[in-house]
Amino acid sequence: MSQKTERICKKGHHYFKSSDCPTCPVCEEERKAEAGIFAVLAAPARRAMASHGINTLEQLANYSEKEILQFHGIGKTSIPALKNLLAERRLSFKA
């Protein structure tokens, strides 16, 4: 296991990490609070939604499961959560 090193993000948050991952956990928690409907997803999946301009379930319904799975950060475990979110609004993935 690698030794944790102290880092400072662009916003000035201090945190410790043992990996090369540059993601600040404090910033990630702030993003999660702002994630709204996609807050149930893991951080990489939330970033994938945002990077593809998907901010609403109506926008998500314009994609097929296969298309969503192609996004970097989306894994098979994200699909059930997304299906549940869509179903709550009587929506589904594009066929």
Image: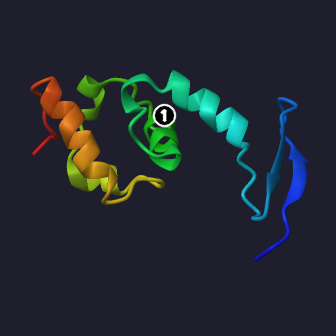
Between residue 54 and residue 7, name the one nearer to us: 7
Classify 56 as above or below 79. above
- 93 horizontally vs 1: left or right: left
Classify 48 as above or below 10. below
Classify 21 as above or below 68. below
Secondary structure of residue under mark 1? helix
Classify 45 as above or below 40. below
Q: Quadrant of residue 20?
A: bottom right
Of the 4 image quadrants, the one containing the N terminus is bottom right
- 8 horizontally vs 39: left or right: right
- Count of all numbered marks drawn on residues in the image: 1
Q: Position of residue 12 (x, y in %)?
A: 88, 31
Of the 4 image quadrants, the one containing the C terminus is top left
The residue to which callout 1 is attached is: 50
Q: Position of residue 23 (x, y in %)?
A: 70, 47
Q: Position of residue 24 (x, y in %)?
A: 73, 43
- 76 horizontally vs 83: left or right: right
Q: How is the image coloured?
A: rainbow
Residue at image point 30% right, 60% down: 76
Residue at image point 19% right, 32% down: 86
Residue at image point 63% right, 37% down: 28
Question: Seen from this angle, which residue lies furthest bottom?
Answer: 1
Between residue 12 and residue 58, name the one nearer to us: 12
Task: Name the amino acid type tagged 1.
Answer: Ala
Q: Residues within 10 Å of mark 1 (few under 14, many from 20)?
A: few
